[in-house]
Amino acid sequence: MQAALGVLAFSFSFPATAWALEGFGPWTVTGLRGVLAALLAGACLLASGARVPPRSAWPGLAAVAVGCAVGFPLLSTLALRLSSTAHSAVVIGLLPLATAAVGALRAGSRPPRAFWLAALAGAAAVLAFTVQQSGGAGLTTADLYLFGALLLCAFGYAEGGRLARDLPGWQVIGWGVVAALPVTALTGALALAVEPVHWNWHGVTGLAYLAAVSQFGGFVVWYRGMAAIGVPRASQLQLAQPLLTLCWAVLLLAETLPATALPTALAVLVCIALTQRAGRREAGRAGRRQ
């Protein structure tokens, strides 16, 4: 149940970003959501009596900070100024594939050929979608932002998953957003001085959601759910996240879905399922060899 709540929580992130941009500039959104998330995470870490991680964990926590607390929030926010939520949801639907690929490379493992074929097929589907959406002109600036966000978040997720073997998962993201606080605080302060602020219900609600849920609270229930039902079952639930975001884009933002958005999202979903199936088969063979 908690893993499903985590997926549901993250599926609102892009609509919440679109709302936040109605009141704040993209750099302000990135800085303030990071500061608020760090304050919340810091309070939770103090209340739980969490110990400061050992020195060996901080390079990984720096990757979490750069990828999940700064890079992805900033680049995805910049992309959503130029692109629709629906378009962005399809592109970011590649995140599980990218995370699996980065994790495999980082761990030095050798997934089977079927894994890489499915991953490449998913990437090709999204690339074709982005080119079609640009009228054949190639990748747009928004697409470049999204692919950059995708890669940075994949590294952050992969390092976070590695660290979660030794630290509770919620502490990994907690220390990650706290580590990013000097950067997010400086970003927020500088941005507030130059970007206009329009106080409105959508802007404040979107920013609050991004800070409290997308950047911290959602990870708490997500990691607890993974611990309760296991990574394979939890990751299956995550397949629904891009499709849920497409639904919220229509229901909350009144966006019109491109004709190819849903088929592309479904194609990516199938590719992710195939990579997971190939990975489980390889893990089973490795277990039998031992």
Image (cartoon, rainbow, N blue to C red):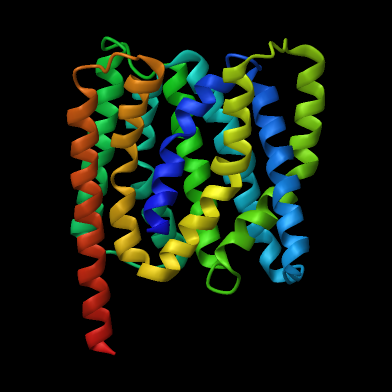
The C terminus sits in image quarter: bottom left
The percent coordinates of residue 192 (x first, y second) are 78, 19
- Give the residue displayed 66% in from the left and 34% down from the top: 33
Residue depicted at x 22% and y 53%: 273
Residue 171, percent across and down? 64, 62
Q: Nearer the viewer, residue 60 or 5?
A: 5
Q: Residue furthest bottom?
A: 290
The number of discs equals: 0
Residue pictured at 29% horizontal, 29% vertical: 127
Asked if residue 29 is positioned above or below residue 55 in the image, the reply reads above
Residue 88 sits above or below residue 65 on the image: above
- Residue 67 visible, this orientation: no
**Whole-percent x, y for residue 259 in the image:** 19, 17
Q: Quadrant of residue 194?
A: top right
User: Which is nearer the eye, 251 or 128?
Assistant: 251
Q: Does residue 87 appear left or right of residue 121 in this picture? A: right
Quarter of the image for residue 12 reads: top left
Residue sitting nearer the eye, 11 or 148: 11
Q: Is residue 64 above or below residue 279?
A: above
In the displayed structure image, the side of residue 193 where residue 177 appears, left or right:
left
Quarter the N terminus occupies? bottom left
Q: Write down the quadrant of residue 37 in the picture.
A: top right
Left or right, residue 90 beside residue 9: left
Residue 17 appears in the figure: yes
Q: x, y (%) of residue 178?
A: 73, 50
User: In the image, is residue 156 above or below residue 27?
Assistant: below
What residue is shown at x 67% (from left), y 60% (from top)? 59
